[in-house]
Image (cartoon, coloured by chain):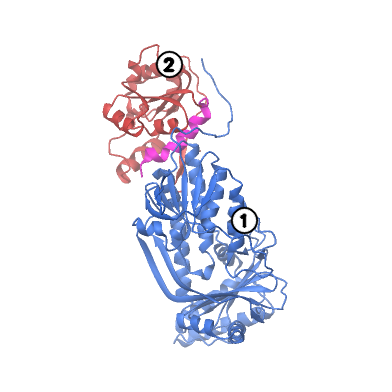
Amino acid sequence: PNPLLAMNPCRVRFLLRHLPPPPATVLDVGCGGGILTGSLLNLGYDVTSLDPSSSLLQVLKSRHPSATTINGTVESLPPSSTYGSVACLEVVEHLSTSTLPAFVAAVADACEGTVVVSSVDRSPIGGYLKGILLPERVLGLLPAGTHEYEKLVRPAELEEAFGAVGWEMVEVKGMRVVGGLGGELRFG
Amino acid sequence: RIHTHTHTYIYIYHMAAHQSISIVGGGVTGFSLLSILSKRLPSIPVTLYTAFLPPPPPSSPSPDVRTYALSPGSVKVLSEAGVDLGSRCQPYTSMQVWDSLTPSYLRFSSSSLDLGTPNLGVCAEDSYIVSSLHEAASKLPNAKVTTDKVAKVDGSRLTTEGGDVVDSSLLIASDGGNSFVRKSQNYGCTWHDYGRTSLICTVRTSETSSVPTAFQRFFPAGPLALLPLWGGYYSIVWSTTPEHARALRGAGEAEFVDAVNSALQGGPSRYQADTGIGLVDDLASTLVNGLSLVNMNEPLGSCGPFAAPPLLDSLGSERFLLPLHAHHAGTYYKEGQVLVGDAAHGVHPMAGQGLNLGLKGVRSLADQLTEAHGSGVGLGDDHPLSCYEADRRSDVAKVMGGIHALHHVFGWEGGPGVAARSVGMTVTNMAGGLKRELARAAIGEI
């Protein structure tokens, strides 16, 4: 089972609570192979898919030929590029702590309305045990080294980083597994 | 600069790629899915392929021979699908199960065990249910039924005998135990032949009973079930050896009714355990005889008194034979395709769970597809199908295993096995807590 696929419906439902209805514009930061992009396109959103990896963007294009893609980083976007909403799913935990403020500022600049961030909390249970030890080393769901504990971000740190550029945190929600291994992911 | 949107909106989606669902196989499972999915996903065309259209609902006062014992959960699923059983059904509130070699018995009722349901189950005709489902579906603009025959299936693409190629997002196979889709698409299936045959018919009695009760008596070859219908009719399902079943079918009507009556009414009033260990034999016999005898007259603990089933007067229908087996598909889904109901799994009819398991699958699949659709996930994607399998597979395996165990336990004809099961049944009959769990399993809630 692919954790990203399993997480996707839950994340999309959270997004739908905060995004304006389609066909609003959404920037998918760190879109990868396009799991979120695909769902948002299906729901009728006007999606722009951004990723620094050209090979992953090729995978996305093969699945969604009509997708609008940008090969690059959010910091490299021209200042005039803005979108109604920005989604940063499973991105900030891969950045080093020193580059977080610049990243957050760039995301805020690119967004007119709502930013949604999904990440792994830097906590001993949620972050290390459930986010790294179990999936990477015990269950083999993720390749070892996918996440580094030092790079995980706490919600309070994100709130601070966005607060520094004038943005306010609206909602924080955790995700948990219901129904054991192979079960579903729900808010909670 | 911060816009907080608080709005609730109904999930009516404009999917970039037009999606649709094909269902292969009519029957209760297929038509339930047609109705429920069409209702929950109003923008998705759902088409059912069936060999023949359901005939109009039965109107004869005597019940059809093909009936189901629906659990309360199944009644709920059918209700969502638009079936109103009305008066063409028989709820039963009590269940009595007993041995043929010893006087031990088990009896429980929905009220005494505080199960939170008005009854233990409802007996209803297949023909009435399917025609109701068909009628409910005909009112939904995105639901379609066709008798075009399916010649070939490949993923979510089907080819009709007429040569039409139909692509859909998801192909649901509800085409029964000998599923064409499952067989032609190499799902793999473990198949266990019980070496037994069920004789199925209806019978009539002039006795009126105050408490509608489902009766089942276990013989070494298999159980004889007597399920209440209406108008003085009962349903008989006698699972036994193929030779015995054929003999019962070939017998004259009066002879057959006599055989059923003596099987249900006769029996030992005393049990002599033969484990081979004197002390164990004495204990087991005393316990079973003592408690059973007492319970039959003045119930102890939480058991109701043993009730003799009604004496039957005559045959109410033709007698049909059904060879018995259990089966479980190797996987429940492939790319763009999923198995539901008997296509995925089949069990011995002794616990009346075949259709109940199927309808639980219907509810699970409908829930997964609705949720997937609401999250922008394609209907034929692996994720909702894999969640459906994860949800159902272990439940089905558990029920199948439990029934299989019962088949073996009640197959014993003597010795420690019979002693154990008789003592077990007698003790359970008096232990409210344990009996409650058993009752919950019997109505398909575990």
The residue carrying mark 1 is: B132
Residue nearest the observer in this picture, B331 or A110: B331
Pinpoint residue A8: horizontal percent, then vertical percent.
42, 36
**Residue matched to label 2:** A82
Q: Position of residue B296 (x, y in %)?
A: 66, 80
Which three-letter amino acid code belongs to the residue tagged 2? Thr
Q: In this view of the protein, which residue sits in the foreground, A36 or B85?
A: B85
Q: Please give left or right for residue B254 compared with residue A137 in the image.
A: right
Label 2: which secondary element:
loop
Q: In the rendered image of this protein, which colour is used for chain A?
A: red
Residue B172 vertical placement versus B300 (above, below): above
Q: CA distance from mark 2 to mark 1?
A: 54 Å
Residues B299 and A85: in front is A85
**Judging from the image, what is the letter of the chain drawn in blue?**
B
Q: Residue at x 57, y 71 (%)?
A: B428
Please state the horizontal and vertical placement of residue A147, each as a whole percent of the image: 32, 33
Q: Does the image show residue B426?
A: no
Q: Between label 2 and label 1, give the one nearer the viewer.
A: 1
Left or right, residue A58 beside residue B404: left
Task: Tell me which amino acid carries mark 1.
Answer: Ser
